[in-house]
Amino acid sequence: MKIVEVAEIVASATPAELLAGDDGAPHLGIADNPIWRAALAGDLPVDQLRALVTRVYPVLAGPGRYSFIAKIGVIDRDDGTRLFDRLYRVTHDANSDADAGWRRMGEALGIPGDDLAAALDDPTPEARDLVDTIRYHGEQSGAAQAAGVAWVLERQMPVLMGDLADALRDHYGVAEDALSYLRAEAARAEEVADWVAHLIEKYFMTADSYTVYEARRAMREAGWGWTALTEAD
């Protein structure tokens, strides 16, 4: 077999154009799935919603709670300092405690505490895979890939949490005082969006063509991982 060396990789578009094309793509929109759409509209049967909330728990809490911090190893020192500052503020806000807050919300929805604890102790394969994907691209791939994964998941999560809180209150009878974690996450939407936009501008928009390709592949892996988790039995 003849191996052909490619002298130069030619981009099909600029990083900004490629990202604009990705924005709104169904496989990259974490709420753009029939299951999530049904949940947010109040149309998902409550037993299926309980199963979804349980599956997602170890990605947002427990094993996955700090997975987005993994990028500390690939971003520069100034951004690492900024990341740790954000982490400090979140960890010192009782309402932002994902372990306790998600559990409180789940129990208010009728999920036994033992089931939620079991989900943390033994996450589903899909939950493990997604956490591993986030960590891998944060620790080993590079800053552009880590920024891309953050653009898919971290950027969209606060909005989804706010919409989920509204749906649980309006359609599933969950009291507002059980939604404090979701509300705290939703309140961070602008801050998180600004942070991710900074990472994208600094590490994705300035990357060479091949690195942009790899970053977009990492984005798809994150999107597919979230879809697999959402749709798991």
Image (cartoon, helix red, strand yellow):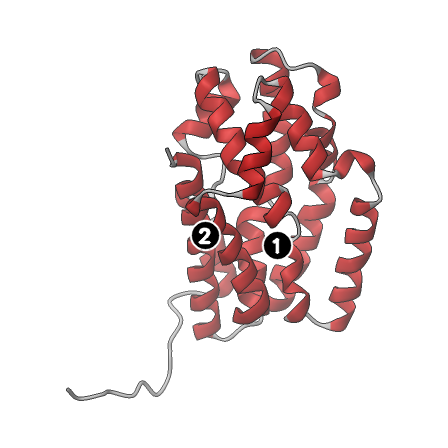
Q: Is residue 21 above or below residue 112?
A: below
Q: What's the amino acid at mark 1? A: Ser
- Name which residue lies at 47% across and 27% down: 51
- Name which residue lies at 82% across and 36% down: 94
Residue 67: mark: 1
Q: Is residue 103 above or below residue 227?
A: above
- Residue 118: x and y in percent read 55, 36
Q: Which quadrant is home to the C terminus?
A: top left
Q: Nearer the viewer, residue 119 or 144?
A: 119
Taking the image as shown, residue 104 lies to the left or right of residue 34, namely right
Q: Is residue 156 visible?
A: no
Q: Is residue 159 above or below residue 16?
A: above
Taking the image as shown, residue 39 lies to the left or right of residue 184, namely left
Q: Is residue 10 visible?
A: yes
Q: What's the amino acid at mark 2? A: Asp
Examine the image and state in which quarter residue 5 appears.
bottom left
> How many numbered markers are drawn?
2
Q: Earlier in the sequence, mark 1 or mark 2?
A: 1
Determine which residue is flagged by label 2. 129
Taking the image as shown, residue 31 lies to the left or right of residue 80, namely left
Taking the image as shown, residue 197 lies to the left or right of residue 6, namely right
Query: Badges 1 and 2: C-beta atoms under 8 Å apart?
Result: no
Cα gap from disc 1 to disc 2, whole angstroms: 12 Å
- Residue 217: x and y in percent read 42, 61
Secondary structure under tag 2 reads helix
